Image (cartoon, helix red, strand yellow):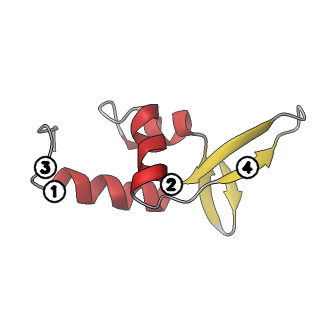
Amino acid sequence: MILLKGEEWGTAAEVANRLGDDVTVAMIRNWSRRDGLSSATVTGANGRPAVHYPLRIAAEIERAKRQGGRGRRRAA
């Protein structure tokens, strides 16, 4: 996780890990495409770029989806 724009951002794997066992990397990427989760490409110390997502916004999307009536039921 990194601090970017005053908020915690992480790769899809890092964000999924922080949000719980039933949140996957694919879900984070889908939220970016479908639900407006922003992303930023950050070049790390190793010189490789990686896409990062804001943890707070991802948590808000996850909360809304968990409380919504569509899709499969997930643990609260």
What mark, if any, has residue 41 been given in the picture?
4
* Alpha-carbon span between mark 3 and mark 4: 31 Å
Question: Considering only order in the chain, which callout, 2 or 4, is on the residue closer to the N terminus?
Answer: 4
Question: Considering only order in the chain, which callout, 4 or 3, is on the residue closer to the N terminus?
Answer: 4
Q: Position of residue 46 (x, y in %)?
A: 88, 31
Q: Position of residue 28 (x, y in %)?
A: 45, 43
2 or 3: mark nearer the eye: 3
Identified by mark 2, the residue type is Leu
Q: Position of residue 68 (x, y in %)?
A: 15, 56
Of 61 and 56, the residue lying toward us: 61
1 or 4: mark nearer the eye: 4
Identified by mark 1, the residue type is Gln
* Alpha-carbon span between mark 1 and mark 4: 30 Å
Identified by mark 4, the residue type is Thr
Picture quarter containing residue 67?
Answer: bottom left
Q: Residue at x 67, y 44 (%)?
A: 51
Name the quadrant of the N terminus: top right
As helix, strand or loop, the secondary structure at mark 1 comes to: helix
**Residue beneath disc 1:** 67
